[in-house]
Image (cartoon, grey):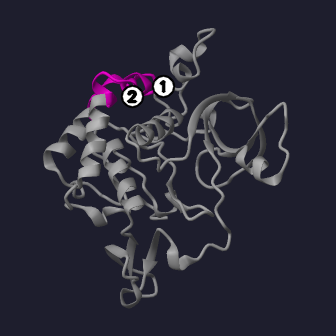
Amino acid sequence: MEVRIIGRIRSGSNAVFLTEEVSPLGASDTESARASLWVHKPVRGESPLHDFPAGVLPPEASVPGASVESQLAGTLAAREIAAYRVSRAAGWDVVPETLPIISAAGPGMIQRFLDIPSDADPEHAPVDLYSPEQMPRDVIGVIALDTEDGETMVLGHRASARIRTIALLDAVINNSDRKGGHVLRSSDGTVWAIDHGLAFHTDPKVRSVLWGFADEPLDDVELAALRALRAGCATGSLRRELAALLAAEELDAFRERIDSLLDAGTFPPPHGGFPLPWPLF
Protein backbone atom coordinates (compact mmCIF):
# COMPACT_ATOMS: atom_id res chain seq x y z
CA MET A 1 0.00 0.00 0.00
CA GLU A 2 1.11 3.54 -0.74
CA VAL A 3 -0.19 6.59 1.12
CA ARG A 4 0.15 10.31 0.56
CA ILE A 5 0.46 12.70 3.52
CA ILE A 6 -2.23 15.38 3.32
CA GLY A 7 -1.93 17.05 6.72
CA ARG A 8 -0.70 16.87 10.29
CA ILE A 9 -2.88 16.00 13.26
CA ARG A 10 -1.66 17.92 16.30
CA SER A 11 -2.91 15.81 19.17
CA GLY A 12 0.05 14.90 21.34
CA SER A 13 3.82 14.69 21.72
CA ASN A 14 4.32 12.31 18.78
CA ALA A 15 4.09 13.18 15.10
CA VAL A 16 0.74 12.11 13.63
CA PHE A 17 -0.30 12.62 10.02
CA LEU A 18 -3.52 12.28 8.09
CA THR A 19 -2.88 10.36 4.90
CA GLU A 20 -4.86 9.06 1.98
CA GLU A 21 -4.38 5.78 0.19
CA VAL A 22 -2.98 6.20 -3.30
CA SER A 23 -5.09 4.17 -5.69
CA PRO A 24 -4.52 3.87 -9.44
CA LEU A 25 -8.28 3.94 -9.88
CA GLY A 26 -8.86 6.93 -7.63
CA ALA A 27 -11.87 7.55 -5.42
CA SER A 28 -15.16 7.89 -7.24
CA ASP A 29 -17.21 9.44 -4.48
CA THR A 30 -17.02 11.00 -1.03
CA GLU A 31 -17.66 7.72 0.78
CA SER A 32 -14.82 5.86 -0.92
CA ALA A 33 -12.52 8.84 -0.46
CA ARG A 34 -13.16 8.86 3.29
CA ALA A 35 -12.63 5.10 3.44
CA SER A 36 -9.14 5.63 2.01
CA LEU A 37 -8.06 7.90 4.87
CA TRP A 38 -5.50 6.64 7.36
CA VAL A 39 -3.76 8.02 10.44
CA HIS A 40 0.02 7.63 10.08
CA LYS A 41 2.59 7.63 12.89
CA PRO A 42 6.18 7.38 11.63
CA VAL A 43 8.86 6.09 14.00
CA ARG A 44 10.99 9.17 13.43
CA GLY A 45 8.24 11.26 15.05
CA GLU A 46 8.05 9.23 18.26
CA SER A 47 8.96 10.91 21.56
CA PRO A 48 10.83 8.56 23.91
CA LEU A 49 9.84 7.96 27.54
CA HIS A 50 12.09 6.55 30.24
CA ASP A 51 10.23 3.21 30.22
CA PHE A 52 9.39 3.21 26.51
CA PRO A 53 12.53 4.29 24.62
CA ALA A 54 10.74 5.07 21.38
CA GLY A 55 12.04 6.56 18.19
CA VAL A 56 15.07 4.26 17.87
CA LEU A 57 14.97 1.79 15.02
CA PRO A 58 16.57 -1.64 15.57
CA PRO A 59 19.84 -2.60 13.80
CA GLU A 60 17.83 -4.72 11.35
CA ALA A 61 16.34 -1.55 9.91
CA SER A 62 19.57 -0.79 8.08
CA VAL A 63 19.77 -4.19 6.39
CA PRO A 64 18.91 -3.94 2.68
CA GLY A 65 15.67 -5.74 1.90
CA ALA A 66 14.63 -5.97 5.55
CA SER A 67 10.90 -6.48 6.11
CA VAL A 68 8.78 -3.57 7.28
CA GLU A 69 8.08 -5.30 10.58
CA SER A 70 11.78 -5.87 11.30
CA GLN A 71 12.27 -2.15 10.87
CA LEU A 72 9.66 -1.44 13.54
CA ALA A 73 10.44 -4.00 16.25
CA GLY A 74 10.43 -2.41 19.70
CA THR A 75 9.01 0.95 18.61
CA LEU A 76 5.73 2.53 19.66
CA ALA A 77 4.43 1.87 16.15
CA ALA A 78 5.13 -1.84 16.60
CA ARG A 79 3.13 -1.88 19.84
CA GLU A 80 0.18 -0.22 18.12
CA ILE A 81 0.21 -2.90 15.44
CA ALA A 82 0.55 -5.64 18.06
CA ALA A 83 -2.49 -4.30 19.95
CA TYR A 84 -4.56 -4.47 16.77
CA ARG A 85 -3.44 -8.04 16.12
CA VAL A 86 -4.37 -9.11 19.64
CA SER A 87 -7.80 -7.47 19.35
CA ARG A 88 -8.37 -9.21 16.02
CA ALA A 89 -7.14 -12.61 17.21
CA ALA A 90 -9.44 -12.49 20.23
CA GLY A 91 -12.40 -11.63 18.03
CA TRP A 92 -12.84 -8.32 19.85
CA ASP A 93 -12.27 -5.97 16.90
CA VAL A 94 -12.19 -2.85 19.08
CA VAL A 95 -9.01 -1.42 17.49
CA PRO A 96 -9.21 0.09 13.99
CA GLU A 97 -7.20 -1.76 11.35
CA THR A 98 -3.52 -0.99 11.99
CA LEU A 99 -0.75 -1.93 9.56
CA PRO A 100 3.02 -1.51 9.14
CA ILE A 101 4.13 0.78 6.34
CA ILE A 102 7.08 2.65 4.89
CA SER A 103 6.02 6.09 3.74
CA ALA A 104 7.80 9.25 2.67
CA ALA A 105 8.30 9.88 6.40
CA GLY A 106 9.96 6.48 6.88
CA PRO A 107 8.88 3.27 8.66
CA GLY A 108 5.82 3.48 10.88
CA MET A 109 2.22 2.43 11.25
CA ILE A 110 -1.05 3.44 9.66
CA GLN A 111 -4.48 3.08 11.21
CA ARG A 112 -7.91 3.43 9.66
CA PHE A 113 -9.19 6.97 10.13
CA LEU A 114 -12.26 7.17 12.36
CA ASP A 115 -15.05 9.51 11.35
CA ILE A 116 -15.82 11.23 14.67
CA PRO A 117 -18.74 13.69 14.45
CA SER A 118 -17.77 17.19 15.55
CA ASP A 119 -21.19 17.64 17.14
CA ALA A 120 -21.10 14.37 19.09
CA ASP A 121 -23.68 14.27 21.87
CA PRO A 122 -21.81 14.56 25.21
CA GLU A 123 -24.69 12.71 26.84
CA HIS A 124 -23.41 9.52 25.18
CA ALA A 125 -19.65 10.01 25.61
CA PRO A 126 -17.88 6.71 26.36
CA VAL A 127 -15.85 8.38 29.15
CA ASP A 128 -16.56 11.69 30.85
CA LEU A 129 -16.65 13.71 34.06
CA TYR A 130 -20.04 13.83 35.77
CA SER A 131 -21.71 15.66 38.60
CA PRO A 132 -22.43 13.04 41.29
CA GLU A 133 -26.10 14.01 41.20
CA GLN A 134 -26.41 13.72 37.42
CA MET A 135 -24.61 10.50 36.51
CA PRO A 136 -26.51 8.48 33.89
CA ARG A 137 -27.67 5.04 34.97
CA ASP A 138 -25.42 3.26 32.48
CA VAL A 139 -22.25 4.96 33.77
CA ILE A 140 -19.87 3.36 36.28
CA GLY A 141 -18.02 5.80 38.52
CA VAL A 142 -14.27 5.27 38.80
CA ILE A 143 -12.98 8.05 41.05
CA ALA A 144 -14.20 11.32 42.56
CA LEU A 145 -12.11 14.39 41.76
CA ASP A 146 -12.08 17.92 43.14
CA THR A 147 -11.86 20.67 40.54
CA GLU A 148 -10.00 23.95 40.91
CA ASP A 149 -13.35 25.58 41.65
CA GLY A 150 -13.90 23.28 44.62
CA GLU A 151 -16.54 21.25 42.81
CA THR A 152 -16.58 17.46 43.07
CA MET A 153 -16.84 15.54 39.80
CA VAL A 154 -16.84 11.81 39.13
CA LEU A 155 -14.75 10.23 36.39
CA GLY A 156 -16.89 7.51 34.87
CA HIS A 157 -17.36 5.34 31.82
CA ARG A 158 -20.24 3.54 30.16
CA ALA A 159 -21.04 0.01 31.31
CA SER A 160 -21.39 -1.25 27.74
CA ALA A 161 -20.07 -4.60 26.53
CA ARG A 162 -17.82 -2.82 24.04
CA ILE A 163 -16.09 -0.75 26.74
CA ARG A 164 -15.82 -3.83 28.94
CA THR A 165 -13.98 -5.51 26.07
CA ILE A 166 -11.60 -2.55 25.77
CA ALA A 167 -10.88 -2.80 29.50
CA LEU A 168 -10.04 -6.48 29.07
CA LEU A 169 -7.80 -5.70 26.10
CA ASP A 170 -5.94 -3.17 28.25
CA ALA A 171 -5.36 -5.80 30.93
CA VAL A 172 -4.05 -8.26 28.35
CA ILE A 173 -1.67 -5.85 26.60
CA ASN A 174 -0.68 -3.97 29.79
CA ASN A 175 -1.80 -0.62 28.42
CA SER A 176 -0.29 2.22 30.43
CA ASP A 177 -2.11 5.05 28.67
CA ARG A 178 -5.87 4.45 28.43
CA LYS A 179 -6.97 8.07 28.52
CA GLY A 180 -10.60 9.06 28.09
CA GLY A 181 -9.73 10.59 24.75
CA HIS A 182 -8.46 7.22 23.54
CA VAL A 183 -11.98 5.75 23.63
CA LEU A 184 -13.95 7.19 20.71
CA ARG A 185 -17.45 6.82 19.34
CA SER A 186 -17.52 6.96 15.54
CA SER A 187 -20.32 8.45 13.47
CA ASP A 188 -22.08 5.08 13.20
CA GLY A 189 -22.17 4.73 17.00
CA THR A 190 -19.37 2.16 17.29
CA VAL A 191 -16.94 2.63 20.19
CA TRP A 192 -13.25 2.20 19.32
CA ALA A 193 -9.96 2.07 21.20
CA ILE A 194 -6.92 3.93 19.85
CA ASP A 195 -3.37 4.88 20.90
CA HIS A 196 -1.68 1.71 22.13
CA GLY A 197 1.96 2.71 21.77
CA LEU A 198 2.58 2.50 25.52
CA ALA A 199 1.68 -1.14 25.96
CA PHE A 200 3.24 -4.61 26.29
CA HIS A 201 5.78 -3.59 28.95
CA THR A 202 7.14 -6.44 31.05
CA ASP A 203 6.31 -4.68 34.34
CA PRO A 204 2.69 -4.17 35.50
CA LYS A 205 1.80 -0.71 34.22
CA VAL A 206 -1.92 -0.56 33.45
CA ARG A 207 -2.99 3.07 33.77
CA SER A 208 -6.58 3.46 32.70
CA VAL A 209 -9.84 5.35 33.15
CA LEU A 210 -11.77 2.09 32.71
CA TRP A 211 -11.41 0.59 36.19
CA GLY A 212 -15.17 0.25 36.72
CA PHE A 213 -15.09 -3.47 35.96
CA ALA A 214 -12.33 -4.31 38.47
CA ASP A 215 -12.87 -7.61 40.31
CA GLU A 216 -15.97 -8.46 38.24
CA PRO A 217 -16.11 -12.09 37.05
CA LEU A 218 -15.16 -12.72 33.44
CA ASP A 219 -18.03 -14.20 31.46
CA ASP A 220 -17.86 -17.30 29.28
CA VAL A 221 -17.29 -15.33 26.08
CA GLU A 222 -14.41 -13.39 27.64
CA LEU A 223 -12.82 -16.55 29.01
CA ALA A 224 -13.10 -18.21 25.60
CA ALA A 225 -11.38 -15.23 23.97
CA LEU A 226 -8.53 -15.44 26.48
CA ARG A 227 -8.14 -19.16 25.83
CA ALA A 228 -8.00 -18.46 22.10
CA LEU A 229 -5.25 -15.92 22.70
CA ARG A 230 -3.33 -18.38 24.85
CA ALA A 231 -3.58 -21.03 22.14
CA GLY A 232 -2.49 -18.53 19.50
CA CYS A 233 0.54 -17.63 21.60
CA ALA A 234 1.50 -21.25 22.06
CA THR A 235 1.58 -22.56 18.51
CA GLY A 236 -0.61 -20.36 16.34
CA SER A 237 -0.04 -17.50 13.95
CA LEU A 238 -0.45 -14.89 16.69
CA ARG A 239 2.86 -15.92 18.21
CA ARG A 240 4.65 -15.35 14.90
CA GLU A 241 2.86 -12.06 14.29
CA LEU A 242 3.79 -10.68 17.70
CA ALA A 243 7.32 -12.09 17.73
CA ALA A 244 8.09 -9.90 14.73
CA LEU A 245 7.15 -6.80 16.73
CA LEU A 246 7.92 -7.41 20.41
CA ALA A 247 10.93 -8.55 22.40
CA ALA A 248 10.95 -12.15 23.64
CA GLU A 249 10.54 -11.08 27.26
CA GLU A 250 7.57 -8.89 26.33
CA LEU A 251 5.93 -11.83 24.58
CA ASP A 252 6.54 -14.00 27.65
CA ALA A 253 4.96 -11.35 29.90
CA PHE A 254 1.98 -11.16 27.53
CA ARG A 255 1.39 -14.91 27.86
CA GLU A 256 1.77 -14.71 31.65
CA ARG A 257 -0.88 -11.97 31.86
CA ILE A 258 -3.31 -14.14 29.91
CA ASP A 259 -2.63 -17.07 32.25
CA SER A 260 -3.13 -14.84 35.30
CA LEU A 261 -6.46 -13.57 34.00
CA LEU A 262 -7.66 -17.11 33.31
CA ASP A 263 -6.52 -18.30 36.75
CA ALA A 264 -8.22 -15.40 38.54
CA GLY A 265 -11.36 -15.47 36.40
CA THR A 266 -11.95 -11.78 37.10
CA PHE A 267 -11.02 -8.36 35.80
CA PRO A 268 -7.84 -7.27 37.60
CA PRO A 269 -7.94 -4.53 40.26
CA PRO A 270 -5.62 -1.52 40.02
CA HIS A 271 -2.00 -2.41 40.74
CA GLY A 272 0.08 -0.92 43.54
CA GLY A 273 1.39 2.00 41.47
CA PHE A 274 -0.51 5.02 40.17
CA PRO A 275 -3.37 3.42 38.18
CA LEU A 276 -4.61 6.45 36.23
CA PRO A 277 -3.14 8.07 33.11
CA TRP A 278 -2.30 11.75 33.16
CA PRO A 279 -3.87 13.77 31.85
CA LEU A 280 -7.11 11.83 32.12
CA PHE A 281 -8.28 12.93 28.67
- Residue matched to label 2: 238
Q: Residue furthest top?
A: 64
Is any atom of residue 151 visible in this view?
no
Q: Amino acid at mark 1?
A: Ala
Which residue is drawn at the image coordinates 31% and 49% (left, top)?
171
The percent position of residue 231, horizontal first and vertical second, equals 28, 30
Image: magenta residue range:
232-253
Disc 2 element: helix
**Residue 280, placed above or below residue 244:** below
Of residue 165 and residue 274, the one placed in the foreground of this image is 165
Residue 73 shows which numbered tag? 1
Mark 2, mark 1: which one is toward the viewer? Answer: 2
Asked if marks 2 and 1 touch (Cβ < 8 Å), the reply is: no
Q: Is residue 84 left or right of residue 254?
A: right
Magenta-span inclusion, residue 63: no
Q: Earlier in the sequence, mark 2 or mark 1?
A: 1
Q: Residues within 10 Å of mark 1 (few under 14, many from 20)?
A: many
